[in-house]
Image (cartoon, rainbow, N blue to C red):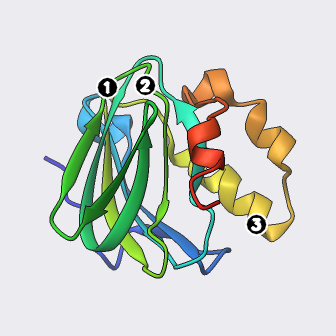
Amino acid sequence: MTVVRAVQAEVLDSDPASVITLLFDPEHTGGALTSNRTLLKDGTDGAPPHLHTHSGELFFVLDGALEMLVGDELHILGTGDALFVPPNTPHAFAPAEGRDADFLVVITPGKPRFDYYRLLDKVHRGEATWQDVGETQDRYDNHYVDSPVWAGRRG
């Protein structure tokens, strides 16, 4: 059993519009899952279109509204809504227009991701680049893809 107390969780907040609280990595769960809580403030870009070749990803909205791309379909999830994205399925997410989104992410089976989120935090501090992030696609099973649907969703 592993317990993560709120006061002990690592919080990545170099970008105050995108706060990630690290909960579990595979080392904590015997490889079963990776999990974080994310708060995206209204107007932030969120995560660009990407897919995971080895893992599925569960999203559960704790508060607010989350706009999601799954394949070529757009969905708005509200408080209490959940969505599962199977492996090899392009997806993206951002707060719905005019709203914040506070949500739980669970990736299963787990793949070490804490260092990926820490790298994103370094980008926001100016200590790493988006090219550095792009070079980690295989290591973190986070493969960026193009999506005309996502790019054109807000006109």
Is 9 above or below relative to 116? below
Going by the numbered disc 3, the residue's amino acid type is His
Asked whether, in this view, residue 75 is left or right of residue 96, the answer is left
- For image coordinates 85% across by 60% down, the residue present is 127
| Nearer mark to the viewer, of 3 and 1 | 1
Residue for badge 2: 89
88 displayed left or right of 6: right
- Of tags 3 and 2, the one toward the viewer is 2
Q: Secondary structure at mark 1?
A: loop
- Identify the residue under disc 3: 124
Determine the residue positioned at 19% across, 59% down: 3
Residue 12 visible in the shown view:
no
Distance between mark 3 and mark 2 Cα atoms: 27 Å
Instruction: Describe residue 119's horizontal placement relative to residue 64 as left or right.
Output: right
Marks 3 and 1 sit apart, C-alpha to C-alpha, by 29 Å
Residue 105 screen position, x and y as percent: 33, 51
- Sequence-wise, the earlier of marks 3 and 1 is 1
Q: Residue at x 57, y 41 (%)?
A: 149
Q: How many marks?
A: 3
Q: Residues within 10 Å of mark 1 (few under 14, many from 20)?
A: some
User: How many residues crowd mark 2 within 10 Å: few (<14), some (14–19), many (20+)?
Assistant: some
Q: Residues at badges 2 and 1 in contact (C-beta under 8 Å)?
A: yes
Residue type, mark 2 in image: Thr
Res. 46 image quadrant = bottom right
**Which residue in the protein does label 1 denote?**
86
Q: Classify 26 as above or below 11.
A: above
Quadrant of the rendered structure where residue 124 is? bottom right
Q: Secondary structure at mark 2?
A: loop
Distance from disc 2 to disc 1, alpha carbons, whole Å, reads 6 Å
Among numbered discs 3 and 2, the one appearing first in the sequence = 2
Q: Are marks 3 and 1 in contact (CB under 8 Å)?
A: no
For badge 1, the amino acid type reads Pro
